[in-house]
Image (cartoon, coloured by chain):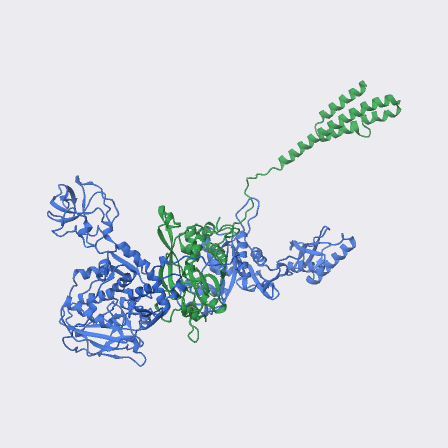
Chain colours: A blue, B green
């Protein structure tokens, strides 16, 4: 919302400076976005008087002038065609900063002639766009005085108005708020008071033909015919104000509607009465009507939109924008003025549907003063009569002012209770009165009737806010929030786990990243996504149109981007949601990681190799271990989803639950994403992790089980078996460990051989087994016995044969 | 005796002349072995009379001890030389690059989350969470955004496809729906912070279609706006690790709070560097950092709480924004680009766990 200082001062009597006004506006919640004060850039500029202007001896288009500053005479070379003797000019002296360029002016020579100062154009001073010539000041301008003092410069203030403060979408409302805060006093507003007597009865009648129950679409329409107007250019002051706030002057009649809209928050519309056919009708639009409008757009109306029509058809989109055909032009002689009231929600919906934006719509959808059609018509009439002449008819009124009076009770102690400040009840009354409320204090309770223009004030807490606001937020107290004497842990077990495993993966050399929750629907199908329920209705772009069914595709894309920058070997992970449906809760929390390219840089000692499924499995295991899962009890199955390489992937299961999947990505996926090197990923399902055991709602004891460290040395024994190639190594170690649980504490594979010394379809697997005696050193017989148990357990489990 | 003296001189000479451990061993055997010359002399003692035996025996023993000592010394020297030679042969170039390891990092959003949790955790705030896909009730209606209200338009909402029956879910535009879920599922007193992903249909230099908010909610019977100001002042001082930060409240509007405020903090931009602090310490500019207010009675009512009995405050801020301010990260969009150079540069080490006692940041 833009306005100028002089415009504000039409409504506000104040001695406050521009800076003070700016600070006050921000303090009362009308946040200043910008104050544009051209005068602030004119420090050092003075007025001058051109004494002589001769042709430059060495340049045809330049002039050599002598200019008086009142105290001395300067020689200035000037290229402006209008530089001539006798002119009063805007003079920049050496050291002045030229506003348009920011350059500091220096004395110089132009084509051999000294130039001691500069005469400026409006453009150079950022006062306008004119750069055809230098500024011509009035003849009676004093010489040698500060330039800003003789220019009528009107600073522009731009504030952002929150949606609840419809009343501040007019300069007068802003003035009222400032006055209530104590910045000056609100001036009387004679233009809106009383009524202008109609000279004749309007031949243009107004009727409301709204369907049953739709009365609120346009509860009130006030119209008036003014005959014999002379429409033309507006006076300079009006054009200046409109231009200053970013509006284009069009003609006096149209400019008046804009002036009233911005000045009083009262949108108006003017019809050329000679283009109307019969009665003006407020009604729902005739569906399918194509209406060419004043904003040079054509809208197709629907039957739920309100329109102002005549007997020939729909004329305007009510409350949004007028139609071109019935609009006023320079030739308009008889004008029919509309001041109406519309349903805010209907206007908002209409504007949204038509994607139409206008100053009127912006105000109607926030709610204008329901009384304003009445006084707004008088205001408009006076301005039109003043600027365009003419004879007004009596006012045509269809509908009535809706009942807006609300009596609100404010218990003063609620201010202290909710806001924590001490404000005397009498002061509360004063503050509310300043806003236009009728407020009285009786029996310790304030009874207030909110003014018609404050539709946002409906309940006690609204008044509490107004008291707090006008008392000044700077006067709030600052109290520490009372808190427990000892901080207690606040994270849930799962939240703690997530933090821990995030740091675990980082400690494993992976870089945590954060990617969009949505992605291209072209890419989701391979990952189980792409259902309509996961698609956005209004994506920001087509490559972000589907909720992600997995984080992996985003990480693959990230590796592609990094590879394109020259970094192909990356290890990324993300903790976040993936989605399997379009309802709240249709998401799983995941830890997903991806290693791409090589295991590391080329190195003199360590062989570089492509990352693979076992890297991914190690990552997944580290995550699960950090999450407190007993990884010893996990089983590996080879049924990972199809986006993994079918022979190089697996699931980590706890019983039937899949806790994680891992593996090389399927070569087809890699190809589709444009990946050249190796890709190995994992996905851990955080929601599937076993929850920590609790006892009766309390966490279990933190005490560890007692350590029983054996005094006897452990022994390691090696075995090698020939098994079918398809047998999982895991099956051998599992069988070995199960052979004697009391004695065998660990086992693992240290060699796998498949090749020419093996029969086809067979492989040799060698494993070590760790035996830990607890009460005596094992005898040879005992060792033999446990070895046999191991061999038979493995043979039974895998069909393998001990190698001789 | 001359013979013994000559023998001694000869043997010592031989020991000194031995060129290596093997030669030395040969000398030892020749002198002290079973058939060595000293051993032979010792064998002759039995045939001597007692006086002669004692005198000669002592003399031979002296020579034997002297010889043994010299042999040991020479042996040690050879062993030392042998070890030195072995070590010399084992030399490696210790300036060669060590075996490669990767340095992993946490994303700044992740680290900032930990910092914020550390601060508010100390004040007794738990962490509440909610779904990214929301319904209209939790995201808008219960938060006092009436249907059709222009304030809804300010949110640039992403919608999912309309379901059968006209239900249209959305991606939450703020973390505030979790306020509703929290108040509906637990009884006051409530103190929670709500971090999470939020979505707005907006993308330019300073907006991304997804970003993170962190929201705070306090509901009890006594907490008022003065506590809100105090709580936020303590937060910004802890978070920015500055002992005194000026906090300014400006009236604003959010449908779900009343009174509402935008919060500015004191800062200085002198010399192109952002410094956050107190006005009296030269931080005379303002930096907008968050929005807040007292929970609107309509929100309390929507959650079945009586506004006459319960009250409290809510606040919300952008996680990326406060991370950018603290760590001097210039561009919001880079947070979501997964550029490993960025992740390594702006990321945090796995062991930099923020705590109030140990310090938030190194």
Q: Nearer the viewer, residue A466 or A667?
A: A466
Report which quarter residue B208 is drawn in. Answer: bottom left
Residue B160 visible to the viewer? no
Q: Position of residue A234 (x, y in %)?
A: 17, 63
Q: How many marks?
A: 0
Q: Residue furthest front?
A: A443
In the image, B148: left or right of A112?
A: right
Report which quarter residue A291 is drawn in. Answer: bottom left
Q: Nearer the viewer, residue A785 or A642?
A: A785
Q: Position of residue B320 (x, y in %)?
A: 43, 56
Q: Quadrant of the N terminus of chain A?
A: bottom left
Residue B253 visible to the viewer? yes
Q: Position of residue A332 (x, y in %)?
A: 16, 70
Q: Nearer the viewer, residue A351 or B263?
A: B263
Q: Residue furthest bottom?
A: A212
Residue at 54% over, 54% down = A505
Q: Quadrant of the C terminus of chain A?
A: bottom right
In the image, A665: left or right of A765?
A: left
Q: Position of residue A32 (x, y in %)?
A: 31, 58
In this rendering, the answer to whether B86 lies above or below B137 is: above
């Amino acid at each position: 919302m833009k306005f100028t200082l002089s415009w504000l001062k039409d409504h506000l009597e104040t001695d406050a400076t521009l800076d003070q006004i700016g600070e006050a506006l921000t303090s009362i919640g009308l946040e200043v976005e910008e104050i544009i004060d051209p005068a602030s850039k004119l420090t050092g500029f003075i007025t001058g008087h051109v004494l002589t202007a001769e042709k430059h001896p060495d340049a045809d288009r330049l002039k050599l002038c002598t200019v008086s500053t009142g105290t001395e005479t300067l020689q200035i070379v000037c290229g402006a065609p209008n530089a001539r003797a006798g002119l009063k000019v805007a003079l920049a002296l050496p050291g002045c900063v030229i506003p348009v360029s920011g350059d500091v002016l220096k004395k110089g020579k132009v084509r051999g002639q000294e130039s001691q100062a500069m005469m400026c154009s409006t453009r150079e001073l950022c006062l306008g766009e004119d750069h055809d010539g230098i500024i011509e000041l009035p003849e009676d301008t004093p010489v040698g005085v500060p330039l800003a003092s003789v220019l009528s410069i009107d600073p522009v203030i731009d504030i952002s108005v929150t949606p609840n403060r419809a009343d501040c979408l007019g300069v007068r409302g802003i003035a009222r708020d400032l006055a209530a805060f104590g910045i000056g006093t609100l001036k009387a507003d004679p233009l809106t008071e009383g009524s202008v007597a109609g000279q004749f009865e309007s031949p243009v009648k107004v009727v409301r033909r709204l369907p049953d129950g739709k009365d609120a679409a346009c509860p009130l329409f006030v119209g008036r015919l003014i005959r014999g107007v002379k429409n033309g250019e507006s006076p300079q002051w009006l054009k200046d104000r409109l231009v200053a706030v970013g509006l284009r002057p069009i003609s006096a009649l149209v400019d008046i509607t804009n002036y009233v809209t911005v000045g009083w928050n009262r949108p108006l519309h003017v019809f050329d009465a000679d283009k109307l056919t019969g009665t003006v009708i407020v009604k729902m639009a005739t569906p399918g009507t194509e209406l060419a409008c004043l904003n040079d757009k054509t809208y197709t109306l629907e039957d739920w939109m309100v329109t102002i029509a005549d007997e020939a058809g729909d004329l305007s989109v009510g409350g949004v924008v007028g139609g071109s055909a019935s609009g006023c032009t320079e030739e308009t002689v008889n004008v029919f003025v509309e001041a109406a009231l519309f349903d805010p929600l209907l206007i908002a919906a209409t504007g949204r549907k038509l994607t139409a934006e206008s100053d009127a719509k912006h105000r109607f959808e926030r709610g204008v003063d329901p009384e304003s059609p009445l006084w707004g018509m008088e205001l408009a009439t006076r301005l039109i009569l003043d600027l365009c002449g003419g004879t007004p008819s009596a006012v045509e009124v269809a509908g009535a002012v809706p009942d807006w009076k609300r009596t609100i009770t404010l218990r003063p102690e609620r201010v202290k209770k909710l806001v924590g400040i001490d404000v005397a009840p009498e002061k509360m009354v004063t503050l509310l009165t300043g806003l236009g409320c009728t407020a009285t204090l009786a029996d310790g309770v304030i009874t207030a009737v909110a003014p018609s223009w404050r539709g946002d004030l409906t309940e006690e807490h609204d008044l509490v806010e107004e008291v707090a606001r006008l008392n000044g937020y700077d006067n709030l107290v600052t109290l520490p929030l009372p808190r427990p004497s000892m901080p207690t842990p606040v994270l849930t077990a799962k939240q703690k786990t997530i933090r821990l495993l995030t740091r675990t993966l980082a400690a494993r050399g992976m870089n945590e990243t954060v990617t969009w929750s949505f992605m291209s629907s072209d890419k989701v199908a391979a990952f189980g996504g792409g259902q309509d329920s996961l698609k956005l209705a209004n994506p920001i772009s087509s490559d972000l149109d589907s909720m992600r069914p997995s984080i992996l595709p985003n990480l693959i894309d990230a590796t592609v981007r990094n590879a394109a920058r020259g970094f192909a070997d990356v290890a990324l992970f993300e903790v976040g949601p993936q989605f399997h449906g379009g309802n709240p809760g249709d998401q799983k929390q995941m830890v997903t990681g991806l290693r791409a390219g090589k295991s590391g840089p080329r190195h003199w000692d360590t062989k570089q190799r492509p990352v693979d499924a076992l890297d991914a499995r190690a990552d997944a295991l580290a995550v699960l271990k950090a999450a407190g899962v007993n990884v010893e009890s996990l089983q590996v199955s080879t049924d990972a989803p199809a986006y993994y390489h079918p022979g190089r992937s697996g699931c980590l299961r706890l019983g039937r639950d899949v806790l994680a999947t891992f593996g090389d990505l399927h070569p087809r996926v890699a190809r589709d994403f444009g990946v050249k090197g190796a890709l190995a990923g994992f996905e851990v399902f955080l929601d599937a992790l076993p929850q920590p055991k609790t006892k009766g709602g309390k966490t279990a004891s933190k005490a560890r089980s007692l350590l029983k460290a054996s005094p006897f040395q452990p022994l390691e024994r090696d075995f090698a078996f020939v098994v079918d190639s398809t047998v999982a190594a895991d099956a051998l170690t599992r069988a070995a460990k199960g052979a004697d649980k009391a004695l065998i504490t660990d086992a693992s594979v240290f060699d796998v051989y498949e090749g020419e010394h093996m029969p086809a379809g067979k492989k040799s697997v060698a494993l070590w087994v760790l035996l830990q005696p607890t009460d005596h050193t094992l005898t040879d017989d005992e060792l033999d016995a446990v070895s046999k148990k191991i061999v038979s357990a493995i043979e039974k489990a895998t069909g393998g044969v001990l190698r001789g | 005796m001359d013979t013994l003296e000559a023998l001694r001189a000869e043997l010592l000479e031989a020991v000194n002349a031995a060129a290596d451990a093997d030669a030395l061993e040969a000398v030892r055997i020749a002198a002290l072995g079973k058939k060595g010359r000293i051993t032979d002399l010792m064998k002759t003692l039995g045939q001597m009379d007692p006086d002669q035996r004692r005198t000669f025996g002592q003399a031979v023993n002296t020579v034997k001890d002297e010889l043994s000592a010299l042999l040991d010394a020479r042996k040690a020297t050879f062993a030392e030389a042998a070890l030195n030679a072995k070590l010399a042969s084992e030399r490696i170039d210790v300036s060669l690059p060590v075996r490669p390891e990767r340095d992993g990092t946490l994303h700044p959003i992740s680290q900032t989350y930990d910092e914020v949790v550390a601060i508010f955790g100390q004040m007794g705030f738990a962490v509440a969470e909610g779904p990214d896909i929301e319904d209209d009730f939790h995201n808008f209606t219960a938060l006092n955004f009436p249907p059709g209200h222009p304030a809804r338009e300010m949110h640039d909402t992403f919608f999912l496809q309309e379901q059968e029956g006209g239900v249209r879910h959305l991606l939450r535009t703020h973390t505030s729906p979790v306020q509703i879920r929290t108040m509906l599922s637990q009884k006051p007193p409530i103190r929670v912070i709500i971090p999470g992903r939020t979505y707005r249909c907006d993308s330019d230099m300073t907006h991304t279609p997804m970003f993170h908010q962190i929201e705070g909610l306090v509901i009890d019977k006594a907490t008022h706006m003065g506590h809100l100001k105090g709580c936020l002042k303590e937060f910004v001082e802890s978070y920015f690790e500055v002992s005194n930060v000026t906090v300014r409240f400006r009236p604003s509007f959010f449908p779900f709070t009343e009174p509402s405020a935008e919060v500015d903090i004191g800062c200085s931009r002198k010399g192109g560097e952002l410094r956050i602090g107190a006005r009296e310490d030269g931080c005379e500019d303002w930096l907008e950092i968050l929005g807040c207010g007292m929970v609107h009675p309509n929100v309390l009512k929507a959650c079945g709480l009586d506004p006459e009995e319960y009250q409290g405050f809510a606040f919300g801020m952008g996680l990326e924004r406060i991370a950018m301010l603290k760590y001097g990260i210039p561009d919001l969009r880079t947070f979501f680009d997964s550029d490993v150079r960025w992740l390594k540069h702006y990321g945090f080490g796995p062991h930099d766990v923020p705590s109030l006692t140990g310090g938030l940041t190194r």
